[in-house]
């Protein structure tokens, strides 16, 4: 089967090219592997983590809030 796919976002193009380069494969081979994995038809599906068990469990903590607020302050001396 042959496909022509248009409108590939630059970030996807970069990732596929890096994947191909790292694996020593052609861009076509890397794209096919990504499609196989992404569609879930590969032999063993990739295990994914569902974060439902932690969603909504954040507890306010004054020390954490103060630390995060301190990170948002601009040190004018560094930018002068």
Image (tube, rainbow, N blue to C red):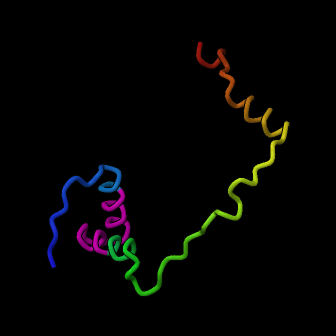
Q: Which residues are magenta?
A: 15-32
Q: Residue at 71% x, 60% y: name it.
A: 54
Report the residue that reaches farthest toward the bottom: 43
Residue 15 percent location from the top left of the image: 36, 58
Q: Residue at 32% x, 67% y: name it.
A: 20
Viewer-proximal residue among 46 and 39: 39
Would you say 28 lies left or right of 72 here? Answer: left
Q: How many tags in the picture?
A: 0
Would you say 79 lies left or right of 37 here? Answer: right
Report the residue that reaches farthest toward the right: 62
Instruction: Confirm whether the magenta stretch covers residue 12.
Output: no
Question: Residue 51's image quarter?
Answer: bottom right
Viewer-proximal residue among 68 and 27: 68
Majority secondary structure in the magenta region? helix
Residue 64 percent location from the top left of the image: 80, 40
Rendered view: 41 above or below 80? below
Rendered view: 17 above or below 29? above
Q: Residue at 35% x, 70% y: name it.
A: 34
Question: Residue 52's image quarter?
Answer: bottom right
Q: Which quadrant: the N terminus?
A: bottom left
Instruction: Confirm whether the magenta stretch covers residue 20.
Output: yes
Q: Which quadrant: the C terminus?
A: top right
Rendered view: 47 above or below 21? below
Question: Residue 24's image quarter?
Answer: bottom left
Rendered view: 14 above or below 2? above
Residue 17 percent location from the top left of the image: 30, 60
Would you say 64 lies left or right of 34 here? Answer: right
Residue 6 percent location from the top left of the image: 19, 56
Q: Residue at 76% x, 50% y: name it.
A: 58
């Amino acid at each position: 089967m042959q496909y022509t796919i248009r409108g590939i976002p630059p970030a996807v193009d970069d990732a596929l090219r890096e994947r191909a380069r790292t694996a020593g494969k052609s861009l076509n081979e890397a794209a096919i592997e990504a499609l196989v994995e992404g569609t879930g038809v590969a032999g063993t599906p990739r295990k994914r983590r569902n974060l439902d068990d932690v969603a909504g469990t954040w507890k306010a903590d004054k020390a954490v809030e103060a630390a995060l607020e301190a990170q948002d302050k601009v040190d004018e001396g560094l930018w002068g």
